[in-house]
Amino acid sequence: MSDRTLPMVIGETENTLRALLRQTLRTTGIGGYQEWVVLNLIDAGTSPEAIATRLRITTHGVAAVAEELIRRGLLLDALTLSEQGRTELAAARESVGETTSGLVEGVTPDQAQVSRVVLETIQRRAAAALDASPSPENAGL
């Protein structure tokens, strides 16, 4: 059994997964984590306010990401993927899916369920802590 704390493991996992996502997205027109999330959530019909909440950034931050995606032709406007955006997102989803499927290979359904419950509990508590002590970074969410 590891002597690393759960927060240490989660932090290292988050950092490694973000680096893996960046590497996987390098072959696409999607420039990183925030663009990946924004494109996926816009494709799902999510409002800019809800995207800001999910990313824990301001709505101005979401608008800045959207403006960059519009400039590069991946969005038609702040709420609509372009044809190029749909094509890039589909290709990226395929690449990310191939990459992530290997990460969970051999994890049993019971292990996956326990992991979901633990991570969702920690996420809810972290969100509540952020909401309870507003900071300039959370202003406008």
Image (cartoon, rainbow, N blue to C red):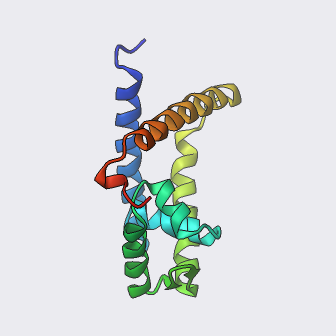
Seen from this angle, which residue lies furthest left? 136
Residue 30 position within the rendered picture, expressed as x and y whole percent measured from the top left:
42, 71
The image shows a total of numbered marks equal to: 0
Looking at the image, residue 47 sits to the left or right of residue 59; the answer is right
Q: Residue at x 56, y 81 (%)?
A: 81
Where on the picture, by quarter, is residue 31?
bottom left
Residue 30 in sight here: yes
Where on the picture, by quarter, is residue 130?
top left
Front residue of this view, candidates 131 and 103: 131
Residue 82 position within the rendered picture, expressed as x and y whole percent measured from the top left:
55, 85
Seen from this angle, which residue lies furthest right? 109
Q: Is residue 83 above or below residue 138?
A: below
Residue 70 position within the rendered picture, expressed as x and y whole percent measured from the top left:
44, 85
Q: Is residue 87 above or below residue 114?
A: below
Residue 91 in sight here: no
Q: Residue at x 35, y 13 (%)?
A: 3
Image quarter (top left, top right, bottom left or bottom right) of the C terminus? bottom left
Looking at the image, residue 19 sits to the left or right of residue 47; the answer is left
Residue 107 position within the rendered picture, expressed as x and y whole percent measured from the top left:
61, 31
Front residue of this view, candidates 118 and 105: 118
Front residue of this view, candidates 141 and 108: 141
Q: Residue at x 52, y 57 (%)?
A: 96
Image quarter (top left, top right, bottom left or bottom right) of the N terminus? top left
Front residue of this view, candidates 129 and 18: 129
Q: Residue at x 61, y 34 (%)?
A: 116
Looking at the image, residue 102 sits to the left or right of residue 65; the answer is right
